[in-house]
Image: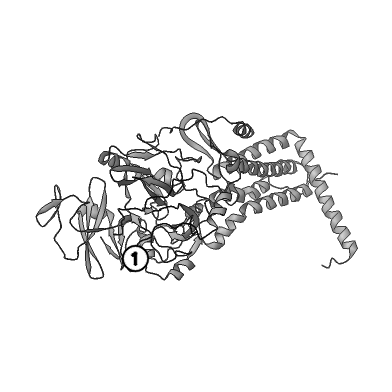
């Protein structure tokens, strides 16, 4: 299709604008409802915890209670240890739970969790609503999956052992792109889901 | 497993964060020119240090160790390990204690080092997160190194420089870089394959792979590396598996990266005690050696004998060009009617170390394998 015609460009711009507007309205609508709020909270929190677990920053360990912090936390915060992975600056032990605190990874995890949560919230509303196209609420969750896998890129992608595939330059490059891919996929599904919700 | 000692440091920054988180074995090492500059070689700092290649050099051996490949071939086979340079941070400011960390069980692997009466133990569960410790022992600057993917713990004299983790692998093996010249050194080869020192071999010394129980029984005065590394890690978690009992990568037939050469003479992760000289390489099956106590093999026409140290569950390899008879006895090993300990036979001992078979065979496809 040729898009040289200014009228076509204007039409496309209008469509995109409408898509974003619809999505914003859909998200607002979803978050004004109880089921939407619950969907956001539950799925967002679950994803955040899974992301940290995937990074091996969260897990079970010997029982204890303490907080220890590196001597130069500000510098260490920005020290990259892998693709989209930064140096932990603190370890929190609360009972059997161990949490490594890497602020930039927590921020990244929170952004991803928010996107997953919004996807789920809108999906739930669309699914329970009268829309002709009934989307399963799993669409957003599936889009968030690569982000969970990105944690396994560190220290040799050990997840490949489980899958039974040997690492290669191509695969390792793919691991580096998992996180940006996740962000794009989550935005894409959010726009798509938003476009399916009746907002008129 | 108990929780190790950790320091509590209350800082405002942390508070905010937490709130929001809801025989080439060298006995005479080159004395170090200075102490380690402290923990935390930050990426930014490291780049200013390591991008130059005209800095101080680590001491090198008088002659190059044998390689089964051209240096260019090895260089072509460098692959990314998935982490950037220093992404796995070496320990530059190690701390030691007279008592072991709480997280160290009797049967957990440790890498032991003795020099001039000073004994040190480096727990595998700590090194799996760092791979290199830039340390000093008996006044000498040394690097104790460990590659989880090849199961190799080796020691190198480092002189005035430190070693870091390049993030690259060859044949699954840790490729170190020196912070003086930025030459790259695959650990098992102990020979630089890129940079100003390409073709040079490092001066090595023996590091013993054993268990904490065996090491501390043999060297009760040993000091042990602590978890106070300058970094925060969940030291109870080994990303690859578990040694006590063996699980995950350490027992699987699978490798993460394709070896330089496939050799199915035994299980890929079977442990061999390997030695290499200027002319060739030779590997003894560790399990068989511990069971039979004496094994023999050849590099070219020269006979070598391996004997087991039953206290440390390790082995030593000696050149035996005159084919002297070495027999195991209750008290040690008998040569010419005299009994000797496993580590002090009246023969020239060559440097040897534990390695996973796939890694040894990958680097040294022409190596004999004795089982």
Is residue B141 in view? yes
Above or below — where is A1 with respect to A145?
below
Q: Quadrant of residue B347?
A: bottom left
Residue, far right:
A7
Of A100 and B230, the residue lying toward us: B230
Q: Quadrant of residue B139?
A: top left
Element class at badge 1: loop
Residue A26 location (% of width, % of height): 79, 43
Instruction: Tell me the quadrant of the picture where the N terminus of chain B can be found.
Output: top left
Instruction: Tell me the quadrant of the picture where the C terminus of chain B can be found.
Output: bottom left
Q: In the image, what residue occupies the spot 48% across and 45% down?
A: B37
Question: Please, which colouring scheme is shown?
Answer: one colour
Please give left or right for residue A99 compared with residue B275 in the image: right
Residue, far left:
B337
Instruction: Look at mark 1 in the image and give the residue it sits on.
Output: B63
Is residue B153 in view? no
Q: In the image, what residue occupies the spot 16% across and 64% down?
A: B323
Above or below — where is B41 with respect to B103?
below
Residue B260 location (% of width, % of height): 42, 66
Of B6 and A105, the residue lying toward us: B6
Residue A64 location (% of width, % of height): 47, 29
């Amino acid at each position: 299709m040729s898009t040289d015609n200014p009228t076509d460009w204007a039409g496309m711009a209008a469509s995109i604008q409408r898509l974003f507007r619809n999505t914003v309205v859909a998200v607002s609508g979803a978050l004004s409802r109880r089921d939407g709020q619950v969907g956001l909270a539950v799925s967002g929190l679950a994803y955040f915890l899974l992301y940290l677990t995937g990074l091996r920053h969260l897990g079970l360990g010997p029982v204890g209670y303490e907080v220890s912090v590196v001597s130069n936390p500000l510098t260490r915060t920005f020290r990259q240890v892998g693709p989209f992975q930064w140096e932990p600056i603190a370890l929190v032990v609360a009972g059997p739970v161990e949490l490594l605190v890497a602020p930039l990874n927590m921020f990244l995890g929170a952004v991803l969790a928010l996107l997953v949560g919004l996807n789920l919230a809108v999906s739930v509303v669309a699914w329970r609503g009268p829309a002709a196209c009934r989307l399963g609420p799993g669409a957003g969750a599936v889009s968030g999956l690569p982000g969970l896998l990105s944690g396994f890129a560190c220290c040799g992608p050990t997840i490949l052992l489980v899958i039974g595939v040997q690492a290669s330059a191509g695969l390792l490059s793919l691991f580096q792109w998992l996180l940006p891919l996740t962000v794009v996929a989550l935005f894409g599904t959010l726009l798509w889901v938003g476009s399916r919700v009746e907002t008129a | 497993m108990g929780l190790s000692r950790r320091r509590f440091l209350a800082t405002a920054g942390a508070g905010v964060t937490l709130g929001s988180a809801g025989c080439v074995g060298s006995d005479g090492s080159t004395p170090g020119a200075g102490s380690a500059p402290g923990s935390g070689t930050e990426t930014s700092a490291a780049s200013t240090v390591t991008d130059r290649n005209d800095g101080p050099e680590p001491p090198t051996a008088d002659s190059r160790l044998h390689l089964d490949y051209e240096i260019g071939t090895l260089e072509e086979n460098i692959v990314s390990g998935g982490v950037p340079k220093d992404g796995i941070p070496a320990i530059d400011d190690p701390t030691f204690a007279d008592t072991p960390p709480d997280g160290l069980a009797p049967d957990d692997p440790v890498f032991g080092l003795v020099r001039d009466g000073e004994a040190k133990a480096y727990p595998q569960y700590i090194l799996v997160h760092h791979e290199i410790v830039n340390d000093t022992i008996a006044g000498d600057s040394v690097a104790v190194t460990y590659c989880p993917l090849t199961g190799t713990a080796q020691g190198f004299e480092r002189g005035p420089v430190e070693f870091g983790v390049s993030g690259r692998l060859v044949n699954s093996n840790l490729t170190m870089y020196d912070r003086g010249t930025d030459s790259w050194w695959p650990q098992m080869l102990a020979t630089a394959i890129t940079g100003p020192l390409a073709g040079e071999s490092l001066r090595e010394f023996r590091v013993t792979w054993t268990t904490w129980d065996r090491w501390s029984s043999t060297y009760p005065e040993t000091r042990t590396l602590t978890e106070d590394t300058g970094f925060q890690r969940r030291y109870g978690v080994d990303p690859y598996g578990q040694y006590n009992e063996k699980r995950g990568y350490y027992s699987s037939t699978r490798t993460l990266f394709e070896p330089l050469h496939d050799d199915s003479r035994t299980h890929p992760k079977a442990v061999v005690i390997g030695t290499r000289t200027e002319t060739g390489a030779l590997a003894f099956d560790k399990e068989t050696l511990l069971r039979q106590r004496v094994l023999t093999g050849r590099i070219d026409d020269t006979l070598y004998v391996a004997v087991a140290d039953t206290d440390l569950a390790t082995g030593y390899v000696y050149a035996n060009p005159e084919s002297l008879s070495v027999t195991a006895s209750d008290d040690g090993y008998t040569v010419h009617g005299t009994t000797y300990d496993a580590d002090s036979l009246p023969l020239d001992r060559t440097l040897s170390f534990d390695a996973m078979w796939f890694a040894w065979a990958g680097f040294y496809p022409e190596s004999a394998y004795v089982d």
